[in-house]
Image: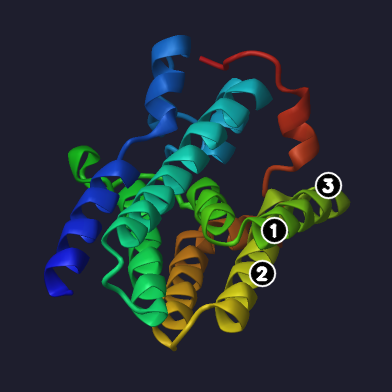
Amino acid sequence: MAVWILIILVISYLVGSIHGSKVAQVLSGVNIKKEGLKNSGASNAAIVLGMKYGILVAVIDILKGVLVIVGVRFCIQQYGIFSVMESDLLLYLAGAAVILGHNFPIYTRFQGGKGTASIIGILFAIYWPIGLIGLLLLVGTTFLTDFLLIGVFVFYAVFIVASIWFAEGVAPIAVAVFLFVMALILHIENFRRLARKEEPRISAFLKKKKPSV
């Protein structure tokens, strides 16, 4: 089991380190890590380059979460040597490693995004109906409040509830709470901007048409 965990953690971390922002940089010529909020997340891509680029980065970062979970689940089913509890543990550890890779990629000196798009892909791949509900709540809350930040943490709440309700054992819940706390820490500056009424609004993303260089 320990060998499986190590292999899954390493591969998932490396996949998580692949960023949609790099594709956006190739297409636009703009390194979003040096512009706007100075991170490689989809929200910063939207701020710097416009909504289309934000969507592109989000889709790529969502897909890597989906691919890792689907790949791990396929291996679990192929070998058939794990209990339900062990399978859930492996899936959640894989998801956590993807987020860690996204947030702290080794090849960019551990300066990455904040994991929002990837956590969406992970929940979709683990429990797709709950992932769909979470995404709808994220989008609805974001447009209702005009702040993506609020929608993101509604999604994390759904992720934790799904982990409590559907996963076997306490380990998946612990992983979900860990990811939630990490997201809170990485979004501290967003909350500070929100308190100062400086946090970018989603309506501003929608109006942005072209790169600001």
Please tell me whether mark 1 or mark 2 is closer to you in this view: 1
- Specify which label sits upstream in the sequence, 1 or 2: 1
Name the disc covering residue 143, or none.
3
Amino acid residing under circle 2: Val
The residue at 35%/79% (across/down) is 83
The residue at 75%/33% (across/down) is 204
Q: Which residue is mark 2?
A: 158
Amino acid residing under circle 3: Phe
Q: Is residue 55 above or below residue 173?
A: above
Dot 3: within a 10 Å radius of its alpha carbon, few (fewer than 14), some, or many (20 or more) residues? some
Spot occupied by residue 60 in the image (x, y as percentages of width and height): 48, 32
Q: Is residue 14 left or right of residue 174?
A: left
Secondary element at image label 2: helix
Dot 1: within a 10 Å radius of its alpha carbon, few (fewer than 14), some, or many (20 or more) residues? few
Distance between the Cα atoms at labels 2 and 3? 18 Å
Nearer to me, 194 or 77: 77
- Specify which label sits upstream in the sequence, 2 or 3: 3
The residue at 54%/46% (across/down) is 117
Q: Is residue 114 above or below residue 61?
A: below
Spot occupied by residue 132 in the image (x, y as percentages of width and height): 71, 53
Q: Which residue is mark 1?
A: 129
Q: Are marks 1 and 2 in contact (CB under 8 Å)?
A: no
The quadrant the N terminus occupies is bottom left
Dot 2: within a 10 Å radius of its alpha carbon, few (fewer than 14), some, or many (20 or more) residues? some
